[in-house]
Image (spheres, rainbow, N blue to C red):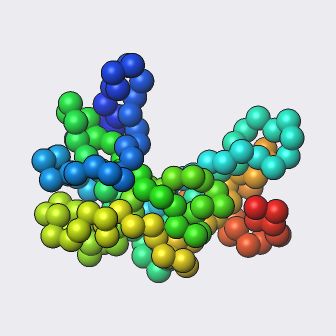
Amino acid sequence: MSPWAWSATNGKPVFNFRSEGRDFAGSDRVLILATGFYEHSTPRKPGVKLMDRFFFTMRDQPWHWIAGIVKDGCFSILTTEPGPDIAPFHKRSVVPLAPTDGVEWLTLSKDEADIFAPLPENTPEVRVIRRDGIQLAADPAKPVPADEGGLLQGL
């Protein structure tokens, strides 16, 4: 298995790699198996240092792929513009793919712009893990649904 993140020219790790405007035909493309992914945002409450933490899953799918590439023996996750359900939480999104769509990324049998398109509305399900410094779910595998208690109000 490849380690996560190659080193950029400045020595910092490249965990996520922007997909737009790039041609991946000559890249070593990989699929990363996932049951969900996290996004973080600045807390609404002033003075809170811990970032808000949200867990996204694909509605009605127990797992999905995330598109990635390998460089220098390490993999990085591809990102794209967020869809309407992710945009309130983060300015970027990983590139999640349905279980049946992974082969399209590996073979580029679908146009890259379509592969990297933001998720349509109501595709991901968001759960709140931490909000305004308050841990709402001790076990990220069993997070609190985002719509409980008005936790998403004011976004």
Q: Is residue 147 left or right of residue 98?
A: right
From this viewpoint, which residue is outermost toward the front? Answer: 21
Quarter of the image holding residue 94?
Answer: bottom left
- Residue 90 shows in the view: yes
In percent of the image, x 57 and y 52: which residue is there? 91
In percent of the image, x 39 and y 19: which residue is there? 10
Q: Is residue 89 left or right of residue 64?
A: right
In percent of the image, x 17 and y 60: which residue is there? 106
Residue 140 position, x and y percent, is 59, 55
Quadrant (top left/top right/bottom left/bottom right) for the C terminus: bottom right
In percent of the image, x 41 and y 52: which residue is there? 79
141, 103: nearer the viewer = 103
Residue 96 position, x and y percent, is 39, 63
Quarter of the image holding residue 16?
Answer: top left
127, 67: nearer the viewer = 67
Residue 114 position, x and y percent, is 31, 70
Q: Is residue 25 left or right of residue 99?
A: left
Residue 103 position, x and y percent, is 19, 67
